[in-house]
Image (cartoon, grey):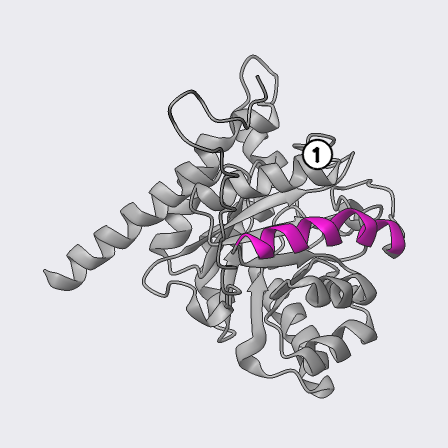
Amino acid sequence: MDSLAAAPGTGPATSPLPILRKPRPAARFADLPTDRTLVMGILNVTPDSFSDGGKHATADTAIAAGLRMFYAGADIIDVGGESTRPGAEDVNPEEEQRRVVPVIQALVKAGALVSIDTTHASTAAAALQAGAAIINDVSGLTIEPEMAELVASSKAPYVLTHRRGDARTMNSLAEYQDVAGEVVAELAGVRDKLYAAGVTPDQIIVDPGLGFAKNDAQNWELLQNLDQLAGLGHKVLVAASRKRFLGTLLTVAGKSAAPEERDAATAAITAISASRGAWAVRVHDVGPSLDAVKVASRLAAAHTNH
Protein backbone atom coordinates (compact mmCIF):
# COMPACT_ATOMS: atom_id res chain seq x y z
CA MET A 1 0.00 0.00 0.00
CA ASP A 2 1.20 3.46 -0.73
CA SER A 3 2.30 5.02 2.56
CA LEU A 4 0.12 8.07 1.89
CA ALA A 5 -3.01 6.05 1.21
CA ALA A 6 -5.79 6.00 3.77
CA ALA A 7 -6.00 3.10 6.14
CA PRO A 8 -9.31 1.23 5.89
CA GLY A 9 -12.10 3.17 7.52
CA THR A 10 -10.07 6.32 8.11
CA GLY A 11 -11.15 8.38 5.11
CA PRO A 12 -8.99 9.93 2.43
CA ALA A 13 -5.29 10.50 3.05
CA THR A 14 -4.09 14.03 3.59
CA SER A 15 -0.57 15.38 3.26
CA PRO A 16 0.96 16.49 6.54
CA LEU A 17 0.94 20.24 7.06
CA PRO A 18 4.35 21.87 6.98
CA ILE A 19 5.68 23.01 10.32
CA LEU A 20 6.09 26.75 10.13
CA ARG A 21 8.80 28.15 12.40
CA LYS A 22 9.17 31.81 13.05
CA PRO A 23 12.76 32.90 12.44
CA ARG A 24 14.55 33.72 15.66
CA PRO A 25 15.29 37.39 16.12
CA ALA A 26 18.95 38.19 15.67
CA ALA A 27 20.85 38.00 18.95
CA ARG A 28 22.14 41.37 20.04
CA PHE A 29 25.21 42.31 22.05
CA ALA A 30 23.07 44.71 24.07
CA ASP A 31 20.90 41.82 25.26
CA LEU A 32 23.73 39.82 26.84
CA PRO A 33 23.35 39.17 30.57
CA THR A 34 24.94 41.80 32.79
CA ASP A 35 24.51 40.14 36.19
CA ARG A 36 27.32 37.59 35.77
CA THR A 37 30.46 36.82 33.84
CA LEU A 38 29.67 35.63 30.31
CA VAL A 39 30.86 32.37 28.76
CA MET A 40 32.26 32.48 25.24
CA GLY A 41 32.51 29.06 23.58
CA ILE A 42 35.49 28.36 21.32
CA LEU A 43 34.71 26.96 17.87
CA ASN A 44 37.82 26.35 15.79
CA VAL A 45 37.06 25.54 12.16
CA THR A 46 40.66 24.51 11.59
CA PRO A 47 42.79 21.42 11.00
CA ASP A 48 45.60 22.49 13.34
CA SER A 49 44.40 24.24 16.49
CA PHE A 50 46.30 23.02 19.57
CA SER A 51 43.35 21.48 21.40
CA ASP A 52 40.70 20.51 18.88
CA GLY A 53 42.33 20.84 15.47
CA GLY A 54 40.50 18.78 12.84
CA LYS A 55 37.48 18.00 15.02
CA HIS A 56 35.37 20.71 13.40
CA ALA A 57 37.16 21.08 10.09
CA THR A 58 34.01 20.96 7.94
CA ALA A 59 31.08 23.37 8.02
CA ASP A 60 28.63 20.64 9.06
CA THR A 61 30.68 19.37 11.99
CA ALA A 62 31.49 22.91 13.08
CA ILE A 63 27.85 23.98 12.96
CA ALA A 64 26.83 20.93 14.99
CA ALA A 65 29.52 21.65 17.58
CA GLY A 66 28.52 25.32 17.75
CA LEU A 67 24.88 24.43 18.25
CA ARG A 68 25.80 22.05 21.06
CA MET A 69 27.64 24.90 22.81
CA PHE A 70 24.74 27.28 22.19
CA TYR A 71 22.20 24.86 23.63
CA ALA A 72 24.54 24.16 26.56
CA GLY A 73 24.23 27.82 27.48
CA ALA A 74 27.15 29.61 25.83
CA ASP A 75 26.45 33.33 25.70
CA ILE A 76 28.72 33.85 22.68
CA ILE A 77 30.17 31.43 20.10
CA ASP A 78 33.66 32.49 18.97
CA VAL A 79 34.29 31.15 15.46
CA GLY A 80 37.84 31.05 14.10
CA GLY A 81 39.30 29.75 10.85
CA GLU A 82 43.02 30.19 11.54
CA SER A 83 45.00 28.64 14.38
CA THR A 84 46.77 31.17 16.58
CA ARG A 85 48.85 28.65 18.53
CA PRO A 86 52.63 29.27 18.62
CA GLY A 87 54.23 28.08 15.39
CA ALA A 88 50.97 27.90 13.43
CA GLU A 89 51.08 28.51 9.68
CA ASP A 90 49.31 31.53 8.23
CA VAL A 91 45.98 31.03 6.48
CA ASN A 92 45.06 33.39 3.67
CA PRO A 93 41.87 35.40 4.28
CA GLU A 94 40.03 33.78 1.36
CA GLU A 95 40.47 30.30 2.84
CA GLU A 96 39.69 31.60 6.31
CA GLN A 97 36.41 33.07 5.06
CA ARG A 98 35.54 29.86 3.20
CA ARG A 99 35.79 28.05 6.52
CA VAL A 100 33.95 30.44 8.80
CA VAL A 101 31.23 32.27 6.86
CA PRO A 102 28.81 29.31 6.39
CA VAL A 103 29.24 28.40 10.06
CA ILE A 104 28.51 31.94 11.22
CA GLN A 105 25.43 32.18 9.01
CA ALA A 106 24.00 28.94 10.38
CA LEU A 107 24.65 29.76 14.03
CA VAL A 108 23.20 33.26 13.70
CA LYS A 109 20.13 31.80 12.03
CA ALA A 110 19.72 29.50 15.03
CA GLY A 111 19.77 32.50 17.36
CA ALA A 112 23.36 32.44 18.62
CA LEU A 113 25.44 35.54 19.23
CA VAL A 114 28.66 35.02 17.28
CA SER A 115 32.10 36.58 17.45
CA ILE A 116 34.73 36.21 14.73
CA ASP A 117 38.22 35.23 15.86
CA THR A 118 40.48 36.74 13.20
CA THR A 119 43.44 39.05 12.67
CA HIS A 120 42.34 39.97 9.14
CA ALA A 121 40.11 42.97 8.50
CA SER A 122 38.67 41.45 5.33
CA THR A 123 37.59 38.32 7.23
CA ALA A 124 36.14 40.41 10.03
CA ALA A 125 34.12 42.38 7.47
CA ALA A 126 32.84 39.19 5.83
CA ALA A 127 31.90 37.79 9.23
CA LEU A 128 29.98 40.91 10.20
CA GLN A 129 28.15 40.70 6.87
CA ALA A 130 27.28 37.07 7.71
CA GLY A 131 25.79 38.15 11.03
CA ALA A 132 28.65 38.08 13.55
CA ALA A 133 28.33 40.73 16.25
CA ILE A 134 31.83 40.90 17.81
CA ILE A 135 35.37 41.03 16.40
CA ASN A 136 37.91 39.08 18.49
CA ASP A 137 41.36 40.06 17.20
CA VAL A 138 44.51 38.49 18.66
CA SER A 139 46.91 40.43 16.43
CA GLY A 140 47.93 42.54 19.41
CA LEU A 141 50.58 45.12 18.63
CA THR A 142 50.46 44.29 14.90
CA ILE A 143 46.82 45.28 14.35
CA GLU A 144 46.03 46.07 10.71
CA PRO A 145 45.16 49.74 10.09
CA GLU A 146 42.18 48.47 8.09
CA MET A 147 40.94 46.63 11.18
CA ALA A 148 40.84 49.84 13.19
CA GLU A 149 38.91 51.52 10.40
CA LEU A 150 36.43 48.61 10.21
CA VAL A 151 35.82 48.64 13.97
CA ALA A 152 35.17 52.38 13.83
CA SER A 153 32.82 52.23 10.87
CA SER A 154 30.92 49.11 11.96
CA LYS A 155 30.55 50.15 15.62
CA ALA A 156 31.06 46.47 16.49
CA PRO A 157 32.43 45.50 19.91
CA TYR A 158 36.13 44.68 19.55
CA VAL A 159 38.36 42.42 21.63
CA LEU A 160 41.80 44.00 21.86
CA THR A 161 44.25 41.24 22.77
CA HIS A 162 47.81 41.70 23.92
CA ARG A 163 50.35 39.88 21.74
CA ARG A 164 53.86 40.68 20.63
CA GLY A 165 54.92 39.42 17.22
CA ASP A 166 52.97 36.69 15.44
CA ALA A 167 52.40 32.97 15.84
CA ARG A 168 55.95 32.19 14.69
CA THR A 169 57.83 34.83 16.68
CA MET A 170 55.87 35.52 19.85
CA ASN A 171 57.58 32.90 22.04
CA SER A 172 60.89 34.68 21.56
CA LEU A 173 59.40 38.01 22.68
CA ALA A 174 58.32 36.99 26.20
CA GLU A 175 60.75 39.34 27.95
CA TYR A 176 59.27 41.60 30.64
CA GLN A 177 60.48 43.44 33.71
CA ASP A 178 56.88 43.97 34.90
CA VAL A 179 54.56 41.83 32.83
CA ALA A 180 51.26 43.28 34.08
CA GLY A 181 52.42 46.87 33.82
CA GLU A 182 53.93 46.39 30.36
CA VAL A 183 50.89 44.54 29.02
CA VAL A 184 48.61 47.33 30.25
CA ALA A 185 50.87 50.01 28.74
CA GLU A 186 51.11 48.25 25.38
CA LEU A 187 47.36 47.69 25.23
CA ALA A 188 46.87 51.38 25.96
CA GLY A 189 49.15 52.21 23.03
CA VAL A 190 47.07 50.12 20.62
CA ARG A 191 43.91 51.55 22.12
CA ASP A 192 45.15 55.04 21.23
CA LYS A 193 45.43 53.94 17.59
CA LEU A 194 41.85 52.70 17.77
CA TYR A 195 40.70 55.96 19.26
CA ALA A 196 42.51 57.87 16.50
CA ALA A 197 40.58 55.82 13.93
CA GLY A 198 37.26 56.75 15.53
CA VAL A 199 36.63 53.73 17.79
CA THR A 200 34.72 54.62 20.96
CA PRO A 201 35.71 53.43 24.46
CA ASP A 202 32.54 51.39 24.94
CA GLN A 203 33.40 49.21 21.92
CA ILE A 204 36.64 47.95 23.41
CA ILE A 205 37.08 44.72 25.39
CA VAL A 206 40.62 43.96 26.60
CA ASP A 207 42.26 40.53 26.79
CA PRO A 208 45.66 40.05 28.46
CA GLY A 209 46.62 37.47 25.82
CA LEU A 210 47.54 34.56 28.06
CA GLY A 211 50.06 32.37 26.23
CA PHE A 212 50.74 34.98 23.57
CA ALA A 213 54.34 36.09 24.09
CA LYS A 214 54.14 35.01 27.75
CA ASN A 215 55.71 32.09 29.57
CA ASP A 216 54.00 30.11 32.32
CA ALA A 217 55.06 32.35 35.20
CA GLN A 218 54.00 35.47 33.29
CA ASN A 219 50.55 34.01 32.63
CA TRP A 220 50.03 33.39 36.33
CA GLU A 221 51.25 36.86 37.19
CA LEU A 222 48.77 38.39 34.74
CA LEU A 223 45.92 36.41 36.25
CA GLN A 224 46.98 37.62 39.68
CA ASN A 225 46.83 41.21 38.43
CA LEU A 226 43.58 41.35 36.47
CA ASP A 227 42.68 44.48 38.41
CA GLN A 228 45.47 46.34 36.61
CA LEU A 229 43.94 45.34 33.28
CA ALA A 230 40.51 46.45 34.49
CA GLY A 231 42.10 49.78 35.33
CA LEU A 232 42.12 50.57 31.62
CA GLY A 233 38.38 51.15 32.00
CA HIS A 234 37.09 48.46 29.63
CA LYS A 235 35.44 45.07 29.85
CA VAL A 236 37.96 42.25 30.45
CA LEU A 237 38.00 38.90 28.64
CA VAL A 238 40.05 36.04 30.10
CA ALA A 239 41.05 33.26 27.69
CA ALA A 240 42.96 30.60 29.61
CA SER A 241 41.15 27.50 28.36
CA ARG A 242 43.33 24.40 28.00
CA LYS A 243 46.47 26.50 27.51
CA ARG A 244 49.94 25.09 27.96
CA PHE A 245 50.59 26.69 31.35
CA LEU A 246 47.68 24.68 32.75
CA GLY A 247 49.14 21.49 31.31
CA THR A 248 52.44 22.30 32.99
CA LEU A 249 50.69 22.89 36.31
CA LEU A 250 48.98 19.51 36.05
CA THR A 251 52.12 17.55 35.14
CA VAL A 252 52.09 13.97 36.39
CA ALA A 253 55.20 11.75 36.32
CA GLY A 254 56.99 14.32 34.21
CA LYS A 255 54.26 14.45 31.56
CA SER A 256 52.23 17.60 30.96
CA ALA A 257 48.47 17.09 31.04
CA ALA A 258 46.92 16.81 27.58
CA PRO A 259 44.68 19.71 26.45
CA GLU A 260 41.44 17.83 27.06
CA GLU A 261 42.61 17.05 30.63
CA ARG A 262 42.80 20.75 31.51
CA ASP A 263 39.08 21.56 31.64
CA ALA A 264 38.72 21.32 35.43
CA ALA A 265 41.63 23.74 35.88
CA THR A 266 40.06 25.98 33.25
CA ALA A 267 36.80 26.02 35.22
CA ALA A 268 38.76 26.96 38.34
CA ILE A 269 40.25 29.94 36.52
CA THR A 270 36.76 30.82 35.30
CA ALA A 271 35.49 30.95 38.88
CA ILE A 272 38.42 33.11 40.01
CA SER A 273 38.14 35.42 36.99
CA ALA A 274 34.41 35.79 37.57
CA SER A 275 34.96 36.60 41.24
CA ARG A 276 37.36 39.34 40.13
CA GLY A 277 34.87 40.91 37.78
CA ALA A 278 35.84 39.57 34.36
CA TRP A 279 33.28 40.44 31.70
CA ALA A 280 33.68 37.05 30.00
CA VAL A 281 35.77 33.90 29.81
CA ARG A 282 36.61 32.09 26.58
CA VAL A 283 36.48 28.30 26.97
CA HIS A 284 36.33 25.02 25.08
CA ASP A 285 34.01 23.23 27.54
CA VAL A 286 31.04 25.49 28.19
CA GLY A 287 29.10 23.57 30.86
CA PRO A 288 31.60 23.57 33.76
CA SER A 289 32.53 27.22 33.20
CA LEU A 290 28.88 28.26 33.09
CA ASP A 291 28.40 26.48 36.42
CA ALA A 292 31.49 28.25 37.77
CA VAL A 293 30.27 31.73 36.84
CA LYS A 294 26.87 31.00 38.37
CA VAL A 295 28.56 30.00 41.63
CA ALA A 296 30.72 33.13 41.60
CA SER A 297 27.68 35.30 40.86
CA ARG A 298 25.69 33.73 43.70
CA LEU A 299 28.52 34.22 46.17
CA ALA A 300 28.87 37.84 45.11
CA ALA A 301 25.15 38.34 45.64
CA ALA A 302 25.35 36.75 49.10
CA HIS A 303 28.20 39.10 50.02
CA THR A 304 26.23 42.11 48.77
CA ASN A 305 23.15 41.11 50.75
CA HIS A 306 25.06 40.31 53.94
Magenta stretch holds residue 96 = yes
Image quadrant holding the C terminus, namely bottom left
- Compared with 3, 74 (above or below) is below
State the predominant SS element of the stretch in magenta.
helix
Look at 42% across and 38% down and name the residue there.
Answer: 287
- Compared with 14, 152 (above or below) is below
**Residues rendered magenta in the picture:** 94-110
Image quadrant holding the N terminus, namely top right
> Is residue 254 left or right of 68 when viewed as pictured?
right
> Is residue 75 left or right of 257 when viewed as pictured?
left
Horizontal and vertical percent position of residue 244? 63, 35
Magenta stretch holds residue 192 = no
Badge 1 is on which residue? 50
Task: State which quadrant residue 200 falls in.
Answer: bottom right
> Is residue 137 left or right of 22 when viewed as pictured?
right
In the displayed image of the protein, which residue is found farthest to the left? 306
Look at 64% across and 42% down and name the residue there.
Answer: 63
Look at 67% across and 69% down and name the residue there.
Answer: 186
Circle 1 sits in a helix, a strand or a loop, which is it?
loop
Q: Nearer the viewer, residue 114 or 305?
A: 114
- Compared with 258, 139 (above or below) is below
Horizontal and vertical percent position of residue 298? 23, 52
Which residue type does callout 1 highlight? Answer: Phe
